[in-house]
Image (tube, grey):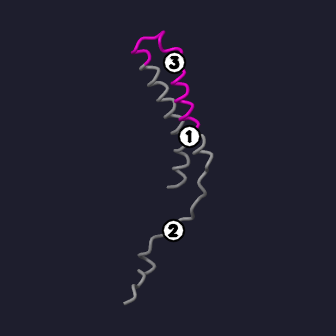
Amino acid sequence: MAQESPPESQQPTKRSAQKFPLWIMYVSIAVAFGWLIFLALWLFYYASGFSILQNIAIFLLLLVIALALETLLWVPWFMKQR
């Protein structure tokens, strides 16, 4: 028994695949490493002059900035894929 392929109307449609922009991935990796390096330098050299709450606030601010950069990179590409 040979398996029959579904009729044309039931086959999934294939959209033309756009080439994935590698530069977005590289910039995302650079943002992540930059965030980690800045955070490490901050903790080793500057954190002792601030209270724990101020250090937590700086950590959260840096996290928000990194996430905003990542969002600005990926959302336009994602919207083109939809």
- According to the picture, the residue beneath numbered tag 2 turns out to be 14
Q: Residue at x 48, y 70 (%)?
A: 13
- According to the picture, the residue beneath numbered tag 1 turns out to be 28
What type is the residue that disc 2 sits on? Lys
Which quadrant holds the N terminus? bottom left
Q: Residue at x 51, y 18 (%)?
A: 44
Q: Nearer the viewer, mark 2 or mark 3?
A: 3
Q: Residue at x 49, y 55 (%)?
A: 82
The outermost residue toward the right is 23
Q: Main secondary structure of the magenta part?
A: helix
28 lies above or below 56: below
Query: Start and end of the magenta stretch?
Result: 29-55
Which quadrant of the structure image shows residue 19? Answer: bottom right
Q: Is residue 16 left or right of residue 63?
A: right
- Quick one: 37 or 59, which is closer to the camera? 37
Q: Which mark is residue 44?
A: 3
What type is the residue that disc 3 sits on? Phe
- Quick one: 17 or 22, which is closer to the camera? 22
